[in-house]
């Protein structure tokens, strides 16, 4: 989709416009994600925006108010569009800017587009109203909706040539995705319950007397809600520790991007740990200035150096 003129690549205007469209979606919708990708060079930032815009489209179908049958039809259409992207069958002047940008990004970078099929699979699991008995069951869902995004992103980031342990980069990216998704689940526990969804494993809920669910700003009578949250926080922190091993495998700016995104979620997890019942009162979030601080910290390489020391 990019043409070569006098030995240099020239990106057609419609493709640049498609990327600008995806970047506008990212800037407006990705309140945490955008802080990280701002740290990337232009080509990687564009590709990550295209991935986000496509992923957002899939998520919006699942979270929207359409009838389940219509949602399934839209997901089928989106999967068919992904097939066209995979085949390189989307022309640069196509009327769908997200498809145009994603097609160009897939030509520039070795993006494993099958990860977007996994994302669609995960949203279909939501449509079926699936619940999860054990952590292994929930982890399979998290790999579809978040681990896959980590592996897709790695296709854009790449690894440092010759770095030791690069073969495990997809595993670390996947694990970091699980850490982010489990943090999301903890943050949204009451909001999901209001929508009739329970993501935390049934075994864990039963262990802490929380099987009745979370329909109000107070825990169920007799429940050890704080114990449940502390248990899941420990699990998430373990996933973060493992996933952070990805950072030393990336170049400086890609590592800064990942450190910023993951750092925001890790701080969010710390807030949840400090006041478990806050997630029942409303959505826990970080102020913009704290997100900006985390991004600067990522760019400075603090978390990357810490992860590198742990590998030694």
Image (cartoon, grey):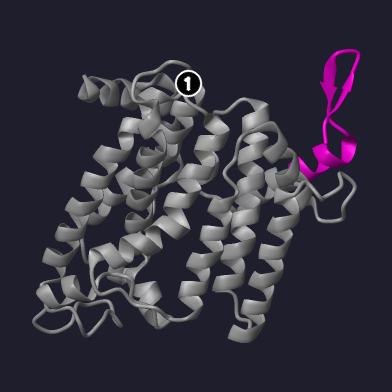
Q: Is residue 198 above or below residue 312?
A: below
Residue 3 is a magenta residue: yes
Question: Which residue has dot 1 on it?
Answer: 251
Q: Residues within 10 Å of mark 1 (few under 14, many from 20)?
A: some
**Quadrant of the frame with the C terminus:** top left
Camera-side residue: 252 or 111?
A: 111
Camera-side residue: 278 or 7?
A: 7
Task: Look at 38% across and 59% down and name the residue there.
Answer: 142
Region in magenta? 1-20
Q: For this view, does 176 lie left or right of residue 92?
A: left
Q: Position of residue 204 (x, y in %)?
A: 17, 70
Q: Position of residue 96 (x, y in %)?
A: 81, 56
In the picture as drawn, the residue positioned furthest to the top comes out as 6
**Quadrant of the frame with the N terminus:** top right
Residue 114 in view here: yes
Quarter location, residue 112: top right
Task: Look at 28% across and 69% down and name the residue there.
Answer: 200
Task: Look at 79% across and 45% down and name the residue there.
Answer: 18
Residue 32 in view here: no
Camera-side residue: 110 or 153?
A: 110
Q: Is residue 97 above or below residue 308?
A: below
Indicate the secondary structure of the residue bearing disc 1: loop
Task: Look at 39% across and 73% down and name the residue there.
Answer: 191
Q: Position of residue 196 (x, y in %)?
A: 40, 83
Quarter location, residue 211: bottom left
Q: For this view, does 57 lie left or right of residue 90?
A: left
Q: Position of residue 78 (x, y in %)?
A: 68, 65
Quarter location, residue 297: top left
> How many numbered marks, from 0 up?
1
Residue 114 is a magenta residue: no
């Amino acid at each position: 989709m990019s043409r070569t003129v006098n030995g240099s690549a020239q990106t057609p205007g419609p493709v640049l416009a498609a990327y600008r469209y995806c970047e506008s979606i990212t800037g407006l919708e990705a309140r945490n994600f955008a802080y990280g990708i701002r740290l990337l060079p232009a080509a990687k930032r564009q590709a990550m925006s295209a991935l986000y815009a496509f992923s957002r489209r899939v998520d919006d179908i699942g979270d929207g108010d359409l009838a389940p049958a219509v949602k399934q039809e839209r997901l089928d259409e989106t999967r068919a569009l992904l097939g066209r992207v995979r085949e390189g069958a989307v022309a640069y002047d196509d009327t769908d800017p997200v498809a145009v940008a994603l097609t160009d990004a897939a030509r520039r970078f070795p993006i494993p587009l099958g990860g977007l099929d996994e994302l669609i699979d995960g949203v279909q699991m939501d449509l079926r109203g699936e619940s999860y008995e054990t952590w292994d069951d929930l982890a399979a869902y998290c790999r579809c909706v978040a681990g896959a995004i980590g592996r897709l992103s790695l296709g854009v980031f790449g690894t440092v040539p010759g770095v030791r342990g690069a073969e495990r980069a997809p595993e670390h990216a996947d694990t970091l995705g699980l850490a982010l998704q489990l943090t999301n689940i903890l943050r949204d526990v009451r909001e999901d319950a209001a929508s009739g969804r329970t993501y935390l494993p049934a075994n864990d809920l039963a262990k802490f007397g929380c099987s009745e669910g979370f329909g109000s700003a107070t825990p169920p009578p007799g429940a050890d809600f704080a114990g449940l949250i502390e248990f899941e926080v420990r699990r998430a922190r373990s996933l973060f520790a493992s996933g952070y091993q990805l950072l030393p495998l990336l170049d400086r700016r890609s590592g800064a991007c990942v450190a910023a995104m993951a750092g925001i979620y890790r701080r969010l997890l710390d807030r949840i740990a400090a006041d478990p019942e806050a997630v029942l009162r409303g959505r826990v979030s970080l102020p913009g200035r704290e997100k900006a601080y985390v991004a600067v910290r990522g760019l400075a390489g603090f978390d990357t150096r810490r992860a590198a020391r742990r590998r030694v």
